[in-house]
Image (cartoon, rainbow, N blue to C red):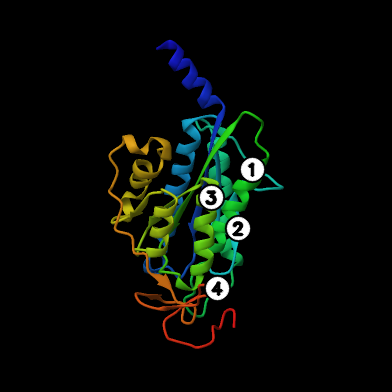
């Protein structure tokens, strides 16, 4: 028994758990337009959740990305500069660094963001691609003999982004090939494309029913590592809608026409494929 415990401790010390959070900060989201204080509430929950992940083990790593209608930015960590940190009594310095960095970066991004004349969809697929690139870069720098388990958590209140269908599919299958789990916390809509991504990568999808309990949902469902989730009682996975998006109108369809050469999907018949001609 003591030998098994020693082996487990040694394995935990040589294993890194990397969590990359993709936070949708698009002002076009219904929950943000309904009440701008909701974004502050979501941000506070994300910071507390990220610190809880770091608190589990000294080897754990965290990254937070902001996704909006015009760009994707790193909120934490900052690649070149550190935020000036004033020590707070009774608070662990690493937790203070996460909180101050994320809040200052997001405040700067929102202040300098271009004004919206009409609602725009979030660049979620591009943000997830950036998260995959970040994970791949860290994976190459891991010391020999050290394992790194990586996962991506997407928090969004945006609508379905069918126009980004191909990019989403590339992200999902790349993550599956790399062994990276994609989790999704939907704050408003039931998102079929992200449900597909969670199903493909063996991740967890959850639609939050009450925003006031967001932190409790995050700690309950998404804090445990994917390797131990089968031992816990978690919400059952939803029935996944595997409809494809047509290339002509970027809308999800039940029945369509597929090009035999490039496999492009169209909702109406066309003798010449507009993708590969």
Real-space Cα distance between discs 4 and 1?
34 Å
Q: In the depicted view, which residue is nearer to us: 69 or 15?
A: 15
Q: Are marks 3 and 4 in contact (CB under 8 Å)?
A: no
Q: Which mark is residue 262?
A: 4
Disc 2 is placed on an element classified as strand
Tell me what residue is drawn at x 54 percent, y 65 percent: 167
Q: Quick check: marks 2 and 4 in contact, CB under 8 Å? A: no
The residue at which mark 3 appears reads as 177
Task: Please determine whether, in this image, residue 7 is positioned above or below residue 275.
Answer: above
Q: Residues within 10 Å of mark 4 (few under 14, many from 20)?
A: few
Q: Position of residue 32 (x, y in %)?
A: 41, 65
State the residue position of label 1.
Answer: 138
Image depth: mark 2 or mark 1 in front: 1
Between label 3 and label 2, give the one nearer the viewer. Answer: 3
Verify CB contact (< 8 Å) between mark 2 and mark 1.
no
- Residue 244, given in percent of the width and then of the height, sits at 41, 70
From the viewer's perspective, is 90 left or right of 112? left
> Looking at the image, is mark 4 or mark 1 earlier in the sequence?
1
Left or right placement of residue 4 versus residue 211 in this view: right
Mark 3 crowdedness (10 Å alpha carbons): few <14, some 14-19, many ≥20: few
Q: Disc 1 on helix, strand or loop?
A: helix
Q: CA distance from mark 2 to mark 4?
A: 33 Å
Q: CA distance from mark 3 to mark 4?
A: 21 Å
């Amino acid at each position: 028994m003591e030998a098994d415990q020693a082996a487990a401790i040694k394995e935990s010390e040589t294993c890194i758990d990397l969590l990359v959070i993709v936070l949708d900060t698009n002002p076009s989201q219904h929950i943000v337009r309904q009440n701008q204080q909701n974004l502050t509430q979501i941000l506070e929950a994300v910071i507390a959740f990220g610190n809880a992940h770091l608190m589990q083990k000294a080897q754990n790593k965290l990254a937070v990305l902001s996704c909006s209608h015009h760009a994707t930015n790193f909120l934490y960590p900052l690649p070149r500069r550190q935020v000036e940190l004033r020590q707070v009594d009774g608070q662990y310095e690493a937790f203070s660094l996460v909180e101050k960095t994320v809040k200052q970066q997001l405040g700067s991004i929102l202040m300098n963001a271009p004004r919206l004349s009409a609602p725009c969809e979030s660049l979620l697929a591009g943000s997830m691609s950036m998260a995959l690139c970040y994970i791949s870069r860290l994976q190459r720098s891991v010391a020999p003999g050290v394992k790194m388990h990586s996962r991506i958590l997407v928090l969004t209140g945006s609508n379905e982004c069918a126009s980004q269908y191909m990019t989403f599919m590339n992200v999902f299958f790349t993550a599956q090939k790399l062994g990276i789990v994609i989790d999704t916390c939907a704050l408003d809509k039931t998102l079929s494309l992200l449900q597909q991504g969670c199903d493909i990568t063996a991740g967890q999808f959850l639609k939050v029913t009450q925003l006031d309990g967001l932190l409790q949902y995050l700690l309950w469902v998404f804090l445990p590592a994917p390797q131990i989730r089968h031992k816990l009682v978690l919400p059952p996975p939803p029935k996944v809608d595997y409809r494809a998006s047509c290339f002509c109108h970027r809308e999800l369809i039940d029945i369509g026409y597929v090009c035999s050469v490039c496999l492009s999907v169209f909702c109406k018949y066309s003798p010449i494929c507009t993708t590969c001609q």
